[in-house]
């Protein structure tokens, strides 16, 4: 028995309808992918644009950002380090690089990159955490004074606090 290749055996649609459906699809915008937290889709779009030569100046920063949020810190590190070598390096890349070093456990490099970053709340929080890691009371208190009454700063403060909750009575023995 000979099967026809013009029509699929299951589904009833011809292969030509698939092409028509795809023609109506549009390439998503980077902003839409980021707002949906679709970091994999965003990296795919950015890599495609890089491959076809349509990349913009900040493509590597966005790829680093997406890789970081996907937990691919080594990839983020590569992108951010390459960005620092560019002639007109965006100064914000230093705080992102410092955060990436921090998540990789490279605390000395994180501190060096953090001090190269422009002053910001994120930079202060990062250096606060590093001072805690290094047990540097003087720096810790300096960065602590710069913390504000905002959610992110309060969470940083709480994560470094030495407060221990009392144990329940069944644990007293």
Image (tube, grey):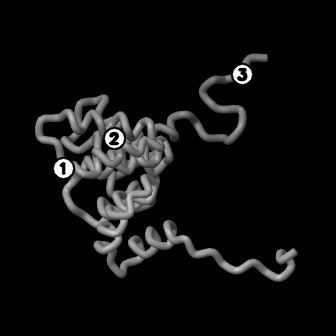
Q: Residue at x 71, y 32 (%)?
A: 9
- The CA span between labels 1 and 2 is 21 Å
Residue 57 image position (x, y, % from top left)? 19, 41
Q: Earlier in the sequence, mark 1 or mark 2?
A: 2
Indicate which disc residue 46 carries.
2
Q: Quadrant of residue 23?
A: top left
Badge 1 local density, few (<14 within 10 Å), some, or many (20+)?
Answer: few
Give the spatial CA distance, label 3 vs label 2.
Answer: 42 Å
Q: Residue at x 29, y 72 (%)?
A: 146
Q: CA distance from mark 3 to mark 1?
A: 63 Å
Of tags 3 and 2, the one toward the viewer is: 2
Residue 146 against residue 27 in the figure, above or below: below
Closer to the observer: label 1 or label 2? 1
Which of the numbered marks, if any, corresponds to residue 91? 1
As helix, strand or loop, the secondary structure at mark 3 comes to loop
From the viewer's side, name the closer residue of 39 and 132: 132
Q: Nearer the viewer, residue 121 or 48?
A: 121
Q: Earlier in the sequence, mark 3 or mark 1?
A: 3
Numbered disc 2: secondary structure: helix
For the image, the number of numbered tags is 3
Is the residue under label 2 in contact with that under label 3 (CB below 8 Å)? no
Identify the disc placed on residue 3.
3
| Horizontal side of residue 134 vs 92, given as left or right | right
Asked whether 147 or 91 is in front, the reply is: 147
Q: Is residue 143 above or below residue 89?
A: below
**Nearest to the observer: residue 3 or residue 166:** 166
Q: Position of residue 67 (x, y in %)?
A: 43, 44
Q: Quadrant of the N terminus?
A: top right
**For mark 3, does the 10 Å Cα neighbourhood hold few (<14), some (14 to 19), or many (20 or more) residues?**
few
Give the number of the disc on residue 109: none
């Amino acid at each position: 028995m000979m099967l026809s290749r013009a029509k699929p055996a299951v589904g009833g649609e011809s292969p030509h309808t698939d092409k028509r459906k795809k023609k109506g699809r549009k390439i998503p915008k980077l902003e839409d992918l980021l707002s949906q937290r679709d970091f994999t889709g965003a990296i795919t779009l950015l890599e495609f644009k890089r491959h076809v030569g349509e990349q913009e100046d900040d493509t590597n920063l966005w790829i680093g950002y997406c890789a970081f949020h996907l937990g691919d810190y080594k990839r983020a590190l590569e992108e951010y380090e390459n960005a620092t070598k560019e002639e007109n390096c965006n100064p914000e890349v230093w705080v992102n690089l410092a955060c990436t070093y921090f998540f990789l456990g490279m605390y000395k490099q994180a501190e060096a990159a953090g001090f190269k970053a422009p002053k910001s709340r994120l930079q202060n929080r990062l250096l606060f955490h590093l001072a805690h890691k290094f047990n540097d009371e003087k720096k810790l208190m300096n960065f602590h004074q710069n913390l504000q009454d905002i959610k992110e700063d309060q969470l940083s403060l709480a994560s470094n606090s030495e407060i221990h909750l009392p144990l329940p009575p069944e644990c007293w023995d």
